[in-house]
Amino acid sequence: MLVAQACEFHKRYPYGMPPPDRFKNPVVDDALLEATLVHLRLLDDFLRSTGGPRSVRAQEWVSQHDWQPRKDWLKPEIPKRISQQVAHLSQQRDAWFEWDIRDYAHRCCRELESFVGAVKRYRPDRSPAFAVIERRVADGLECLDPSRRRL
């Protein structure tokens, strides 16, 4: 979902996120933004193998000895900011915060690509579970590539 949401957001706003009062369709665009950020946070928890006791973690699919996410793939302040802005009611909410959806989602796709590659390499018996994700990640890497000109 993250890839589809981020690519849709990028199509709507190819030059970056406008201030919320400039959304073309405020209800839909705000919902799209929040859903994208929630999925980004979920994937961050998955890749870093954090979250609650019932959370699915990357380390359950491939050992931490064989693969770990890059520490800098997503700056620590971004998941914290998502929690403040979207996931929890917070006094730190800021309707004008500039989210770089294209960059965050592209970085997430790079990490997912690395993770799926490690599963294929070290746990090939488990790799079929990621076939659809692998295709979606490839789509995201193309759609969200920062070296490509804007849509």
Image: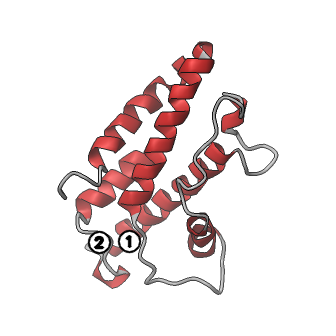
Q: Residue at x 51, y 42 (%)?
A: 111
Asked if marks 2 and 1 touch (Cβ < 8 Å), the reply is yes
Distance between the alpha carbons at the discs numbered 2 and 1: 6 Å
Quadrant of the image containing the C terminus:
bottom left
Who is closer to the viewer here, 86 or 51? Answer: 51
Identified by mark 2, the residue type is Asn
Left/right placement of residue 94 relative to residue 102 reads right
Image height check: is 124 above or below 47? above
Quadrant of the image containing the N terminus:
top left
Q: Quadrant of residue 96?
A: bottom left
Who is closer to the viewer here, 77 or 83? Answer: 77
Q: Residue furthest top?
A: 125
Image coordinates of residue 55 in percent, x first then y, are 73, 44
Q: Secondary structure at mark 2?
A: loop
| Colour treatment of the image | secondary structure
Image height check: is 48 above or below 131? below
Left/right placement of residue 145 relative to residue 60 reads left
Who is closer to the viewer here, 47 or 30? Answer: 47
Q: Label 2 neighbourhood size at 10 Å, few (<14), some (14-19), many (20+)?
A: few
Left/right placement of residue 50 relative to residue 140 reads right
Does residue 9 appear in this view?
Answer: yes
Residue position for label 1 = 27
Q: Residue at x 31, y 50 (%)?
A: 144
Image height check: is 120 above or below 53? above
Q: Residue furthest right?
A: 53
Residue position for label 2 = 25
Image coordinates of residue 14 in percent, x first then y, are 23, 63
Q: Secondary structure at mark 1?
A: helix
Image coordinates of residue 131 in percent, x first then y, are 46, 23
Does residue 1 appear in this view?
Answer: no
What is the number of callouts on the image?
Answer: 2
Identified by mark 1, the residue type is Val
